[in-house]
Image (cartoon, coloured by chain):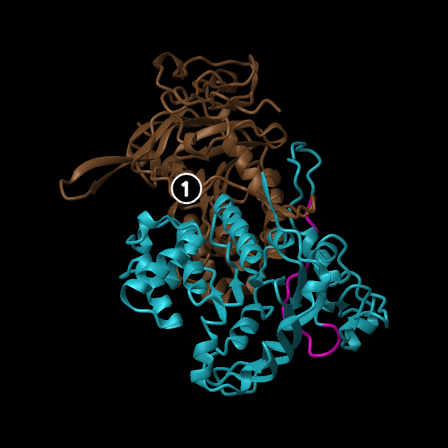
Amino acid sequence: MTIETSAVPASAQAVPLLRVRDLRVTLPSAMGVAAVPVVDGVSFVVHRGETLAIVGESGAGKSITAAAVMQLLPDGARVTGSIDFNGRELTQLDERALQSVRGREIGLVFQDPSTALNPMYSAGWHVTEAVTLARALKGKAAKEAAHAVLLQVGFPSARFHAYPHELSGGMRQRAMLAIALAGEPQLLIADEPTTALDVIASGRIRALLAELRHQRGLSLWVISHDLPMVAELADRVVVMYAGEVVEHGPAHRVLRAPAHPYTRDLLECLPPMGGHSTRDHRHRLPVIPPADSVPSEGCRYAPRCRDALALCHAEHPTLRPTADGEARCILVPATGDAQ
Amino acid sequence: MTKPNPDATDADKDDEFTGVESEERTPKLDAPDRRRPQALLYVQKLTKAYPTNRGFFRSTELLHALNGVSFYIRHKETLGIVGGSGSGKSTLGRCILRLTEPTLGRVVFDGNDLTAISASELRGLRRRMQIVLQNPYTSLDPHMTVGDIIAEGIDIFGLAAGRKDREEQVAGWCARVGLSESIATRHPHELSGGQRQRVAVARALAVKPDFLILDEPTSALDVSVQAQLLNLLQDLQAEFGLTQLFISHDLRTVQYVSDRIGVMHFGRLVELGRTADVVARRLHPYTRALFEALPSLETNRRALPVIGNHDDANPLAPPAGCAYFAHCPNAEPGRCDVETPVLSETAPRSRHRVACWHPFTN
């Protein structure tokens, strides 16, 4: 028994919903010294009805990118570039206009549902509050709407009045999803939506995300470091390293035949399935040398890359088109006619 | 340092007792068997029940975090314990070390019944049993330097001959786990997650233990850092002949590092066997659900499994019979919801055991 998650036909996908161009984010540093941009010239598109995943390790700039799109960065953060959502430039909107975009048009789910919910209030209260704010409903109507949203995410109505601590991780994440969906957004940004969950709860949340996307035509932008999870959920994958996009393409190709050495190395780090049993011939996982610092010249991955040439350390590679996406590596042959 | 103990039971005998109610299955500590190497650790019917007061009338109910868990771990073997949140995996690790006092059951470590010995005897054995915890951000004392953290056990057990020896040992451990020596004067907050976990490993190994419990040691780490730590743990196990209990919800990692796997559900061990057998056969419906929920790069699946709702199960009101009954595709009403299945051999003398009335037969 399975739920089909196969992608919407390519032709129907081509309408962009969110278009981020040359996004640069510089966070204020403690000493007032100009810091290196944590997001450095990132461009990508989320099409209507598709699932885009941004993957990478901690510090790659994935979550900062999402925070920048939602204009939720701390004071003093410098953002340049263009964020076009549904024909509107989000960087030009004032705080009031942004409030109506957040929650109502773009929903957001964070990694850790145990800290995102207020322990003083019940799950139902949170969702009712979200419905009240996003849809200007009141009283009984708001409560009914909250029940309806919770039903959609598979949250049992018997637990409407349960407090966050009384819920399992999976149930808390469902409550979070209900809050994010309360305003009936077109785009859902899910930052590590399954990382805090065990494998079964994670599987059910993944199935739910796929179902929501299928039934409501929701566009999904998933941020994760979990490559197998992404392989299952996403249509397209953007791989980030040190604030830059290093590879982009269809999920099935990027995660099975990666073009960029970093994507390849990350995939090889996953313990292979099959059950190891011979103690004398222990398999060893390939080692990516630790990242001490990001070089100011050349390819940012070069110090850790086993294929790096002298040129890689000297010249910063550009993101070049490939047959079905893009890659930032001089070792990957570029094609002129992609896109 | 592991002296042979004439009083230990043998691994083969242990196969016979399976954490059930029958008393005659208790192993005899005075029945040595020379055919097989003895196991280092025996866990017998280990149970941890927490009393809980709920509701207006304050009726006390028992929450069984651990419910009659039995297994053994042979010398130099890695037993993996996998299960969802709330399955009792971490309680198991804590009860073995008596960091949490078990309600019932025995833990026999190298012939010593840990649940029956005095506090001072236990303290002596503590050196030989160490634990590495999941979260390197909270398990290291932020006020101590890395050097003092690593040397903590060395100091407690008096394993250093003078200050110079202590410093040399710390430097040696830093080098052995892949940290630069200069890190010894730093504090945990100055380190990355991977470095902190290396410190936790060095601290555990500095007292030269025989047995190491790893409770989600890599779960908080990035993929590339996780790979390095798994390699390091494998090297250290081979070098020091460590016996390990590797607890994780991450099936992919557990099946990679373990010689045998135990699957836990609702405080019980529901399947136990050699890793290759468990991975290939997945006899218990819960084990199968775990594997099916695991996203896979290999199969290029574009369809998600429909997994029964496990989220709303209430540990305070466990159903009669098998706790997996409500979610199980093979459930037989009238039996599975009445009689609790016992971990038993799948075939005569088989080392692959399952607690299920209707396991998958492939």
The one nearer the camera, A97 or A111, is A97
Q: Is residue A133 above or below residue B289?
A: below
The one nearer the camera, B57 or A61, is B57
Q: Which residues are magenta?
A: A284-299
Which amino acid does the dot numbered 1 rest on?
A: Ser
The answer to which quarter of the image holds residue B101 is top left
Magenta segment includes A292: yes
Q: How many marks?
A: 1
Residue at the disc numbered 1:
B90
Residue B138 at what x, y percent from top left?
Answer: 41, 57
The answer to which quarter of the image holds residue A217 is bottom right
Q: Is residue A283 left or right of residue B56?
A: right
Q: Is residue B47 above or below residue A31?
A: above
Query: What colour denotes chain B?
Result: brown
Q: Residue at x 41, y 16 (%)?
A: B27
Chain letter of mark 1 equals: B
